[in-house]
Amino acid sequence: MNKTQLHLNNLKLLAKEAGSMVELARRCGYDNSASLSQIKRRLEQQSEDENGRGIRPSLLAKLEAGMGKRKGWMNREHDPEAEQRRKEVAAARAAAAGQAEGAASAPALGFDSAEGRTAVVSRNTCETQITVAVNLDGTGKSRFDTGVPFLEHMLDQVARHSLIDIDITCKGDLHIDDHHTVEDIGITFGQALKQALGGKAGIRRYGHAYVPLDEALSRVVIDLSGRPGLVYNIEFTRALIGRFDVDLFGEFFTGLVNHGMMTLHIDNLSGKNAHHQAETVFKAFGRALRAAVEFDPRMGGRIPSTKGMLIEA
């Protein structure tokens, strides 16, 4: 399979996953879906050309980010049926190995999925097996077992400052690096938040917060819009905090935004200490999220949108 055929096949897979080429274009930030359709036609015309250039790297990155795929996904062959079988096998093994532990994870924080704004979401792949439980109307309790201590420290800040109860367990391929674990936790946490929010009737929808820590100051603004969008402006002063690669924070928030269906603006306004920079971002995110998910008594249970809906709208 040449590069053009590979890109064409993967573009079709993304369109199928999104539901249509129009929806794929929307998720990837295109105002006009015709541009993607034109690319698809060009790839079809050049599919037999061994020298075909395929899709340019900037567009590949845009497609991967818009659909929550890892960097390089478009340049690899995928067999959806085989991947689904592998996921099912991995899920079955994870369920068999951790059935007792998994069954106890949500009740440990007092979650009752039958009442209130709660959700328990599991995501199992060949790289990670994750369960996330959230209670939007909690008290900020948290429990983490991920194998990535600094991420757990940051997520504890989110729970404490959002007053959302969060329980996350993850078994990931940490022998490779932390990338898959951090990214997939972001994805699953986003899915859990989206599920717990339901139709979003009566919520405030928007939230923002400024949080300082000594010399560092960060601003986070959130819109539970039903549309994924991330503006991420953090220039960390060093590449590692302990053993944690700060580039992975971008992967975490990308997965969270794309699967939580929210618009998120993150700006670190000042800071010399990378730990302080990160901590102000996660504290501000927790504070902004708390404001956005809270009920507004003046809304009277209405949807905070003139569209009448905030679900992928």
Image (cartoon, helix red, strand yellow):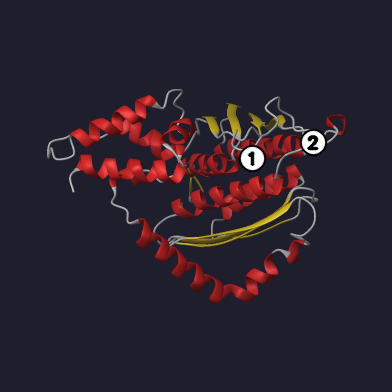
Q: Is residue 127 left or right of residue 203?
A: left
Kindly identify the residue that appears in the image at 17 percent across and 44 percent down.
2
Quarter of the figure with the C terminus: top right
Indicate the position of residue 227 as horizontal and vertical percent values.
Answer: 57, 33
- The Cα atoms of the two marked residues, 1 and 2, are separated by 25 Å
* Residue at which label 2 appears: 202
Numbered label attached to residue 48: none
Which residue position holds label 1?
Answer: 282
Q: Amino acid at mark 1?
A: Phe
Q: Which of the pair 116/57 is nearer the observer?
A: 116
Q: Position of residue 11 (x, y in %)?
A: 34, 40
Disc 2: CA contacts within 10 A as few (<14), some (14-19) or many (>=20): some
- Is 123 situated left or right of 201 in this image? left
- The one nearer the camera, 196 or 253, is 196
Image quadrant where residue 99 sits? bottom right
Q: Nearer the viewer, mark 1 or mark 2?
A: 2
